Amino acid sequence: MLEKRWLSTKEACWYTSLSRNTLYKLLKEEKITAKKAGRKLLWDRYSIDEFLESETDEDRKVKRILESLR
């Protein structure tokens, strides 16, 4: 399943363990990319991987704590 490059929103949330709102925020900040396919948005797994690899462990811990407080 995760060999494909373009992920649905549900798949991208599962893949990253991030909320839908966080994915959209990262897209708006141009930290990850996506493309429109009709009415749906498809998330670029390569872009997501690149973003996740660029974060430090401390960054991820802080983000998960903030997510849990919302």
Image (cartoon, grey):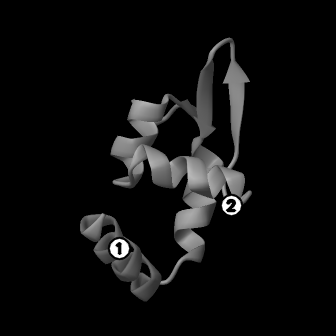
Write the residue at 47% across / 48% down. 21
Q: What residue is disc 2 on?
A: 31
- Give the crowd class for mark 2: few <14, some 14-19, many >=20 residues within 10 Å: some
Describe the element under mark 1 as helix, strand or loop.
helix
How many marks the image carries: the answer is 2
User: Where, by quadrant of the figure, is residue 36 drawn?
Assistant: top right
Pick the residue in front: 23 or 56: 23
Badge 1 is on which residue?
Answer: 66
Distance, label 1 to label 2, CA atoms, is 18 Å
Q: Residue at x 63, y 14 (%)?
A: 39
Q: Is residue 16 above or below residue 61?
A: above
Q: Earlier in the sequence, mark 1 or mark 2?
A: 2
Q: Quadrant of residue 34?
A: top right
Give the side of residue 47 with respect to residue 13, left or right. right
- The residue positioned 39% from the left and 54% from the top of the image is 18
Quadrant position of the C terminus in the picture:
bottom left
Mark 2 element type: loop
Task: Give the amino acid type for the residue marked by disc 2 in the picture.
Answer: Lys
Residues packed near mark 1 inside 10 Å, few (<14), some (14 to 19) or many (20 plus): few
Q: 11 left or right of 38?
A: left
